[in-house]
Image (cartoon, rainbow, N blue to C red):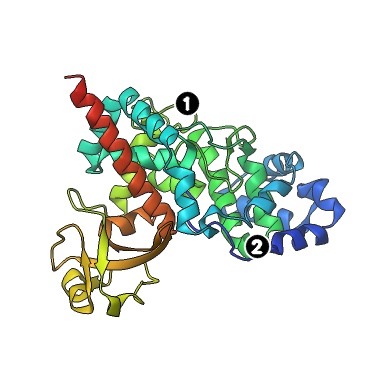
Amino acid sequence: MKKQLISKKSGIVLLLLCLLPASVNANYSQRKDVQQFIAEMQKEYDFDADLISYWMQGVKQQKTALEAISRPAEGKPWKEYRDIFITANRINKGVKFWKENAAILARAEKEFGVPAQYIVSIIGVETYYGKNAGNYPVLDALTTLGFDYPPRASFFRKELKNYLLMVREEKLDAQKLTGSYAGAMGMPQFIPSSFRSYAVDFDGNGVRDFWNSSADPIGSVANYFKRHGWKKGQPVVSRAMVEKRARKLGDKTMKPHKTVAAYKILGVKSVDNFNDSAQATLLKLDGKNGDEYWMALHNFYVITRYNHSPLYAMAVYQLSKAVSEKYYAQLNANK
């Protein structure tokens, strides 16, 4: 779950790496800015300062995390971005994941009102159904970005704070958990603040586990969508037919702000039959065959709360559709 983790200023990281003092790699606990952070954690949250200092002594600066954060996949055009996620292998793996977790997904759909295919698709886009959940020590990644990545230092220090609170609350080992270069964790790639707010113990074993459980990630994704306003039974997005006079349209905001009826007046009509009173936004994407126009509704906006990129949300939508079609085709064929 990126949640706008990345800076668009590619190249800045390489400059920062060149300017970093050699002592940075030696011992984070000796740095004044880190010592100030430790003091704040002790004062505000009654942490053992010596324990955090001990953890920081073992942190290794993750230079590859600094490099990776400067080249987001979301910087690609849609025609290239789509090919990363909408593949035969990812669709087939999604069907397999759904079959293996059918009962859990059905329960999550019933409890939270989020269709199973969207839960499957999120996990598929994020980590290839758990295969690519990341092998960065979360403590190292968040410390590196929190203290050596000025463009988003305050954000990542906040996530480091939430991480330390999380491991204390969940009784986990701060030095052993792994995740993405940006500190996102497990199958659904929750950052620590999201884990603390939205993760659920869906298998009822008393812990919220993203590393050894499928049930907890499934329930947590569904809970995240519900808490962000997913509307049960409502459509998500549709291709749109755009008259020549409206081809310069394409909204920059993801939040629906015009009615479907208002778009019709402007020369835009969804292929699917949306309610005229529904709030929508118009997307213009750079497809392989030229510009693509899409009319996105509220539930599409909810997907962008997981990752603010419209390309990400569109990949989730299209993968969910492809996986769902194949899953039900196979289900019906076996009847």
Residue 48 in sight in this render: no
Asked whether 188 or 177 is in front, the reply is: 188
Identify the secondary structure beneath mark 1. Answer: loop
Determine the residue located farthest toward the right in the rendered image: 22
Residue shown at 27% from the left, 55% from the top: 299
Q: Determine the image quadrant of residue 240.
A: bottom left
Asked whether 17 or 112 is in front, the reply is: 17
Q: Position of residue 123 (x, y in %)?
A: 41, 39
Which part of the image, by quadrant, shows the C terminus?
A: top left
Residue shown at 71% from the left, 57% from the top: 148
Residue shown at 65% from the left, 54% from the top: 145
Q: Determine the image quadrant of residue 290.
A: bottom left
How many marks do you count on the picture? 2
The label on residue 10 is 2
Label 2 is placed on what type of residue?
Answer: Ser
Would you say the residues marked 2 and 1 are in contact, meaning their CB atoms lie under 8 Å apart?
no
Near mark 2 (Cα within 10 A), the count class, few <14, some 14-19 or many ≥20, is some
Q: Position of residue 324 (x, y in %)?
A: 27, 37
Q: Nearer the viewer, mark 2 or mark 1?
A: 2
Residue 198 in sight in this render: yes
State which tag comes first along the sequence, 2 or 1: 2
Q: Position of residue 47 (x, y in %)?
A: 61, 45
Determine the residue located farthest toward the top in the rendered image: 334
Label 1 is placed on what type of residue?
Answer: Asn
Q: What residue is pinned by disc 1?
A: 212
Asked whether 109 or 261 is in front, the reply is: 261
Picture layout, residue 180 above or below residue 66: above
Picture layout, residue 114 above or below residue 286: above
Near mark 1 (Cα within 10 A), the count class, few <14, some 14-19 or many ≥20, is few
Residue shown at 62% from the left, 54% from the top: 69
